[in-house]
Amino acid sequence: MKRKGTGPDGLVIVDKPAGLTSHQVVSRIRRLAGTRRVGHAGTLDPMATGVLIVGVEKATRLLGHLALTEKSYRATVRLGVGTVTDDAEGDPTVWPGADEGVDEAAVAAAAAKLTGEIMQVPSAVSAIKVDGKRSYTRVRSGEEVRLAARPVTVSEFTLHGFRRGVAEVAPAAVPLAEEARPAEPLEAPGAGAAVPPGEGAAAGAVGTVRVPVVDVDVTVTCSSGTYVRALARDLGEDLGTAGHLTMLRRTRVGPYRVEEASTLERLEEEFSVLGLDAAAAAAFPRWDVDAETARLIANGVQIKAPAMLGEEPVAVFGPDGRFTALVVRGRGKVRSLAVFH
């Protein structure tokens, strides 16, 4: 394996494959980089693919700030079936189906309601802590968890694909309440006969239910903390049915796009990092200072903040072009979030 790049400190823009956890990707990068000082910004679920920002050595100090940036996704939402995880990894919980009223216009209108500044209830199977215990741990132990709604911003929720079909649903082993099941037989498109709730059709496997569904391809751009799985769930609920994600691909984290990302296979062949200087210049507004100002900031000396400095992080660069520190305004002074040189 060849190694190249600007040194051990930097970011690795990984195109995460399906089936791996974000932590497993970090473990692979630790081995390739030859250091345990590796972390990531913004967890991707195992079924998801796409941009995962991994920091190596000093760049790990950037990760908390990169995790707060806007993200973009391509996703497929299945309408007509809900799951415990709000994605295809979880067992089905409800399967009311998607009737003819769930058309493109209705889906687009429902997506519009979920665009802008909204209050979102995160998916119950998430890493959010409830009284010191992860929500997903509580759900898996049989507890019913309803998390508090939180403000998020969805700047884009666009429909660009619409398909009708029939899905074979294998209900979870745990019996569902009767009100969670379809109340009446559903007409599967092209099936020629109604599909009775709780019974598999002749063409279906034993123990499965054939349910009419709609698959929609969407593009989502959203703030940090937004659960795309929860958008799928809420889209279904707004349409009078249920919904969950069947595909999720993160295409952008801040300025870093999937086109720039490397697969793990490529990194195995030739490992490289995006150096600190380039990473900071791409992700944050830039403030070029003279040598004396760079020295004062690096030493933690409080100096008057310029007008361009606000509450959002700004990258300070010295006259040699090196990234010196990440700073914000604090009580009219320059406040360092992290110093690098």
Image (tube, helix red, strand yellow):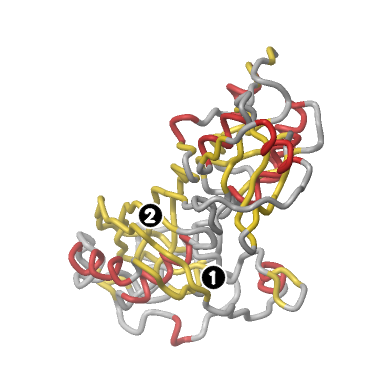
**Marks 2/1: CA–CA distance:** 16 Å
Drawn side of residue 163 relative to residue 288, left or right: left
- Foreground residue, 189 or 157? 157
Amino acid carrying mark 1 in the image: Pro
Q: At x 45% / y 75%, what residue is drawn?
A: 119
Drawn side of residue 98 relative to residue 55, left or right: left
Position in image of residue 81 (x %, y %): 41, 67
Amino acid carrying mark 2 in the image: Val
Report the quarter where the N terminus lies: top right
Report the quarter where the C terminus lies: top right
Q: Which residue is mark 1?
A: 122
Q: At x 50% / y 62%, what residue is drawn?
A: 227
In the figure, 272 relative to 104: above or below? above
| First in sequence: mark 2 vs mark 1 | 1
User: Tag 2: Cα neighbours inside 10 Å, few (<14), some, or many (≥20)?
Assistant: many
Q: At x 20% / y 62%, what residue is drawn?
A: 104
- Foreground residue, 338 or 113? 338
Choose top left, top right, bottom left or bottom right for residue 235.
bottom left
Position in image of residue 228 (x %, y %): 46, 60
In the figure, 106 relative to 49: above or below? below
Q: Is residue 46 visible?
A: no
Q: Which residue is mark 2?
A: 220
- Foreground residue, 322 or 240? 322
Position in image of residue 182 (x %, y %): 37, 79
Q: At x 34% / y 75%, what residue is drawn?
A: 241
In the figure, 178 relative to 317: above or below? below
Q: Is residue 47 visible?
A: yes
User: Tag 1: Cα neighbours inside 10 Å, few (<14), some, or many (≥20)?
Assistant: many
Position in image of residue 48 (x %, y %): 52, 47
